[in-house]
Image (cartoon, rainbow, N blue to C red):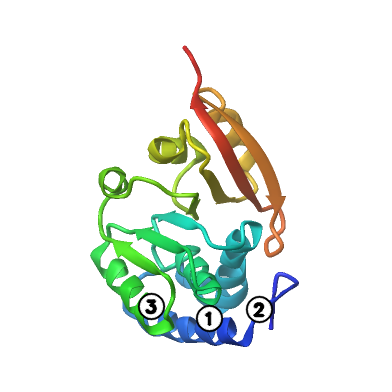
Amino acid sequence: MQLNGKSVSRETQERLEHFAKLFQKWAKTINLVAPSTLDELWQRHIADSAQIYQQSPGAQQWLDLGSGGGFPGIITAIFLAEVGDGWVNLVESNQKKAAFLRVALNETGARGSVHPVRIEAAQDELKDCDRISARALAELDMLFSYTAPWMIGKNTRAFFHKGRDYQAEIAKARGRWAFDLLEHRSAVEQDSVILEISNLRHVSP
């Protein structure tokens, strides 16, 4: 099996397929993603999410914010199961979605745990991480407000999925923040990118 032009082991493929079945089952009663995108589960959500791990492979301590239906957090945790190291802390305040995430982690053997708290509360609960991910959560400026405690003065890198209006979000964020930026073109969606952020700091007034 290949995702985004890269080979995936049979073990990981089986975990992803099991997750997809779970997702489709739970999505009948819980709004995990926009219903209009359910028919494109593999391409629109699973392959798209896999890009995050593929940009920064290997054993890392991940923080996934607003994990929702498990994208990209569960997908990253499934890839880490093959590595046998690393961990994903999934932050999701919606209790029903958090319950789904726990089941998904348990049944796929993925390497992660669920924290059913608001992001602001997670800052006290989870002190350090190597990588941060978020998908369809907030504009870049707000994402920086969320992630600043884990990024400022640290070597943490963040990976954010963004759509075609990402340039406007970057311009707005630069009003309050300074940061190093790498733009990775999406292998799944035209006009979309994954923004790799590092060296985040506040702009002096």
Q: Position of residue 195 (x, y in %)?
A: 62, 46
Sequence-first disc among 1 and 2: 2
Residues packed near mark 1 inside 10 Å, few (<14), some (14 to 19) or many (20 plus): many
The residue under label 2 is 8
Residue 30 in view here: no
- The quarter of the picture where the N terminus appears is bottom right
Q: Which mark is residue 16?
A: 1
Q: Does 187 sit left or right of 35 as displayed?
A: right
Q: Identify the disc placed on residue 24.
A: none
In the rendered image, the vertical position of residue 121 relative to residue 144, given as above or below? below
Disc 3 marks a residue whose amino acid type is Ala
- Asked which secondary structure carries label 3, the reply is helix
Do the residues bearing badges 1 and 2 touch, measured as CB atoms within 8 Å?
yes
Q: Nearer the viewer, mark 1 or mark 2?
A: 2
168 left or right of 205 in image: right
Where residue 24 sits in the image (x, y, percent)?
Answer: 44, 82
Q: Nearer the viewer, residue 112 or 17?
A: 112
At x 68% / y 65%, what residue is drawn? Answer: 188
Q: Is the Cβ of the residue at disc 2 closer than 8 Å to that at disc 3?
A: no
On the image, the x and y values in percent for residue 181 come to 64, 37
Given the image, on which type of amino acid does mark 2 rest? Answer: Val
Residue at the limit of the structure toward the top, as seen here? 205
Q: Which mark is residue 104?
A: 3
122 sits left or right of 17 in the view? left
Residue placed most toward the observer, 188 or 49: 49
